[in-house]
Amino acid sequence: MNYAGSVHVVARDLIGATLRHGDTAGRIVEVESYHQEEPAAHSFIGPRPRTKVLFGPPGFAYVYRSYGIHALLNAVAEEAGVGAAALIRAIEPLEGIEVMRARRHVTRDEELTNGPGKLTEALAIGLELNGVSLEDGPIRIEPRPADSRPPKIVTGVRIGITKAADLPWRFCDATSAWVSRPWPAAMRRRAAA
């Protein structure tokens, strides 16, 4: 994976890649991009001790706690000194599904990993993994397998934020049932057809 390019290109390129931690793995089906130039990004206020990973080299994990509850996983993008990252919002489980079920205690498999806090719980990704390499660290993102189904990428506005909520920086695989709700408008239209 090339993380050094535009965060928006990196986010799109992550769709269909495999996210792996320990004995669990899943196909990335939803990502949102964030950049220091817009107020929803943690990097908007500049480098701080909590956000220094965001301003470091690309290809590292930025893991933070959301609302004091969930750890959320981001892939740092662009060049060092630019605060940009792609939030991994949902994955389609591939390996270690029984382990994920035990961690999540849910009855519907579509609920295992269809949100950023759900997937980190299912894959046991916590704050202690902030700053690890996504290429050779304990969390790995592997390129989309050549023989995998190609994603049908649709875009929409990011969800769960109040600032810069109109930016179309959410990227989803329209063929996956594991995309979090609400689905982007283009995906809802496909499902209704």
Image (tube, rainbow, N blue to C red):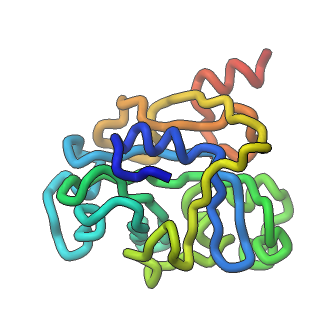
Q: Position of residue 6 (x, y in %)?
A: 34, 41
Q: In this view, does 172 lie above or below 187?
A: below
Vertical order, 183 against 76 (above or below): above
Quarter of the figure that contains the C terminus:
top right
Residue 63: percent from left, percent from top: 42, 70
Q: Residue most toward the bottom?
A: 128
> Which residue is at the far front?
146
Across and down, in percent, residue 1 comes to 50, 53
Q: Position of residue 21 (x, y in %)?
A: 63, 74
Residue 192 placement, left or right of 182: right
Q: Identify the residue at horizontal 15%, vertical 56% (top origin).
A: 45
The image quarter in which residue 93 lies: bottom right
- 155 on left or right of 74: right
At 63% from the left edge and 42% from the top edge, which residue is drawn?
181
Q: In this view, which residue lies farthest toward the top? A: 193
Q: Residue at 68%, 59% (x, y): give it.
A: 113
Q: Nearer the viewer, residue 138 or 165?
A: 138
Q: In this view, does 11 lie to the left or right of 57?
A: right
Quadrant location of residue 39? top left
**Depth order, front residue of 72/146:** 146
